[in-house]
């Protein structure tokens, strides 16, 4: 583990954002670990530091807009956009699908960076990529704080993450006994 990854884990641990127990993830999978980024986002020095680390990964990448899915990616997406001095927009759920609202528009050819807090299967990020494609925009890449797939999730564009970890996940009908004994909670993303 390199120094950046250790620093990210330390930030998540110090802010009580890395939880242990029995959790139902947005993907529907179950896990004994959960990254609750909302806990980190209470503390602006930590948000600024994570934003600086994530922005540093993107050196030389050209984009004019950051698109971050609500709710999870909002705070870190806005911080990356602030550091890049570019526009920030977000899609939000409508009928359980992400859509652009509030007058947000993507122009044809607009270079967009997708920023998310945590990915496990990458469903919300893929929805963002689809929004960009349908609008005629061009996705420059995806940047995330934590890639829970440990690099297994692939997109049609480059992916940068501060931390790759693969805590085991399980379908509801295949829980290990130790996890099945604990009450399941769905803390939200």
Image: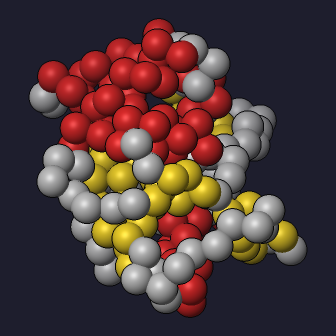
Relative to 84, is 107 on the left or the right? right
Closest to the observer, 79 or 155:
79
Rendered view: 129 above or below 53 = below
- Image point (40%, 83%), residue name: 109
Question: Which x, y percent locates residue 158?
Answer: 25, 67
How many marks can you see? 0
Asked if one can make out residue 68 in the rendered structure from this viewpoint, the answer is no
Closest to the observer, 167 or 119:
119
Relative to 119, is 182 on the left or the right? right
- Image point (32%, 69%), residue name: 140
Closest to the observer, 176 or 8:
8
Question: Residue 156 falls in which quadrant of the image?
Answer: bottom left
Quarter of the image that includes the C terminus: top right
Rendered view: 14 above or below 117 = above
Relative to 64, is 94 on the left or the right? right
Asked if one can make out residue 82 in the rendered structure from this viewpoint, the answer is yes
- Image point (51%, 66%), residue name: 125
* Snapshot colouring: secondary structure
Question: Which x, y percent locates residue 48?
Answer: 43, 23
């Amino acid at each position: 583990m390199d120094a950046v990854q250790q620093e990210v884990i330390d930030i998540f641990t110090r802010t009580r954002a890395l939880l242990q127990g029995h959790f139902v993830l947005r993907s529907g999978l179950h896990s004994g670990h959960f990254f609750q980024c909302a806990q980190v986002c209470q503390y602006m020095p930590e948000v600024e530091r994570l934003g600086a680390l994530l922005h540093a990964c993107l050196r030389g990448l050209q984009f004019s807009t950051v698109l971050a899915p609500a709710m999870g990616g909002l705070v870190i997406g806005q911080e990356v956009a602030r550091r890049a001095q570019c526009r920030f927009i977000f899609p939000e759920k409508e009928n359980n699908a992400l859509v652009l609202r509030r007058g947000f528009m993507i122009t044809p050819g607009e270079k967009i960076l997708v920023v998310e807090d945590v990915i496990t299967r990458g469903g919300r990020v893929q929805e963002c990529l689809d929004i960009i494609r349908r609008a005629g925009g061009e996705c420059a890449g995806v940047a995330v704080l934590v890639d829970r797939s440990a690099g297994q999730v692939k997109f049609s564009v480059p992916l940068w993450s501060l931390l790759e970890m693969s805590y085991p996940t399980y379908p509801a009908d295949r829980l290990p006994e130790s996890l099945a004994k604990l009450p399941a909670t769905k803390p939200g993303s």
